């Protein structure tokens, strides 16, 4: 009997533990979302989504031919996770947007990236192999910033603080800096032609250790 009761207690504990590990279902966005959204947000194929005055307690996924605008020009917005856009129409962060994880935008057709002021990205920012232009303007990227292999229109990298490495290679045409230099100390690596790499595309040098 004691053994049977012990089994029941273990089983009940497992059920309670399992229930606490259940995550909120994904939220599909096809118009405008505001407020707090538990779990991930998914913008399905071909849909258009705007996050305004919103806090997402998870990741944001932008599917094929879909578009995402995170509008924080009036009120701040937060993505407490990663943002991933692949083969999208565009994905654009505007104003005081905070992303605690990484932002990865690839193979998207129209202008994508971020325009602050007030942009804060806790991880890496990658904008690669896009037919549309990439923007990285007026923000703070704590990790690496990578803008590679984009074509069709000039990428713009202006007034950005980069905590890790800054890399921009294989872009046609070359990146520009519409709002002035980035807040950093070393030249951005531009593969072709090296001689014309702009001194305004830079990254922050890590602080020297104190004696």
Image (cartoon, rainbow, N blue to C red):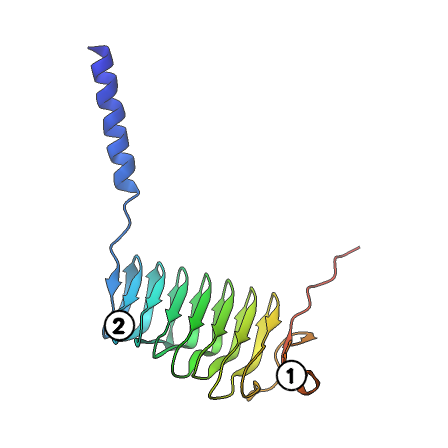
The residue nearer to you, when weighing 72 against 39, is 39
**Farthest top residue?**
1
Give the class, few, some or many, for how many residues have Cα within 10 Å of label 1's Cα (few <14, many ≥20). many
- Vertical side of 102 occupied by 113: above or below: below
On screen, residue 163 versus residue 65, left or right, reads right
Residue indicated by mark 2 = 45
Q: Quadrant of residue 107?
A: bottom left
Q: Quadrant of the C terminus?
A: bottom right
Residue 8 — which label?
none
Q: Residue 114: give x, y in percent of width and height.
A: 45, 77
Residue at 49% over, 80% down = 150
Residue at 21% over, 22% down = 8
Give the structural element (helix, strand or loop) at label 2: loop
Name which of mark 1 and mark 2 comes first in the sequence: 2
- Vertical side of 193 occupied by 29: above or below: above
- Vertical side of 147 occupied by 174: above or below: below
Q: Quadrant of the N terminus?
A: top left
The residue nearer to you, when weighing 138 against 114, is 114
The residue nearer to you, when weighing 117 against 128, is 128
Q: Residue 86: give x, y in percent of width and height.
A: 38, 70
**Farthest right residue?**
211
Q: Quadrant of residue 165?
A: bottom right
Give the structural element (helix, strand or loop) at label 1: loop
Q: Residue 97: give x, y in percent of width and height.
A: 42, 71
Give the class, few, some or many, for how many residues have Cα within 10 Å of label 2's Cα (few <14, many ≥20). some
Residue at 30% over, 57% down = 39
Number of residue marks:
2
Q: Residue 40: give x, y in percent of width and height.
A: 31, 60
Q: Name the mark nearer the viewer: 1 or 2.
A: 2
Residue at 52% over, 79% down = 138
The residues tagged by marks 1 and 2 sit, at their Cα atoms, a distance apart of 37 Å
Residue indicated by mark 1 = 200
């Amino acid at each position: 009997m004691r053994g049977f009761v012990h089994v029941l207690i273990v089983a009940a504990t497992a059920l309670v533990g399992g229930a606490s590990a259940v995550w909120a279902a994904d939220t599909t966005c096809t118009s405008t979302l505001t407020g707090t959204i538990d779990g991930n947000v998914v913008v399905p194929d071909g849909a258009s989504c705007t996050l305004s005055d919103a806090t997402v307690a998870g990741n944001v996924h932008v599917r094929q031919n879909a578009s995402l605008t995170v509008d924080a020009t009036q009120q701040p917005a937060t993505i407490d996770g990663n943002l991933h856009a692949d083969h999208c129409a565009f994905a654009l962060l505007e104003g005081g947007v905070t992303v605690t994880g990484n932002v990865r935008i690839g193979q998207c057709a129209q202008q994508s990236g971020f325009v602050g002021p007030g942009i804060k990205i806790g991880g890496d920012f990658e904008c690669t192999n896009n037919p549309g232009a990439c923007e990285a303007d007026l923000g703070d990227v704590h990790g690496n910033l990578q803008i590679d292999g984009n074509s069709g229109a000039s990428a713009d990298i202006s007034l950005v603080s980069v905590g890790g490495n800054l890399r921009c290679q294989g872009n046609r045409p070359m990146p520009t800096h519409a709002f002035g230099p980035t807040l950093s100390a070393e030249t951005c690596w531009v593969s072709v032609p090296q001689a014309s790499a702009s001194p305004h595309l830079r990254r922050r040098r890590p602080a020297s250790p104190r004696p």
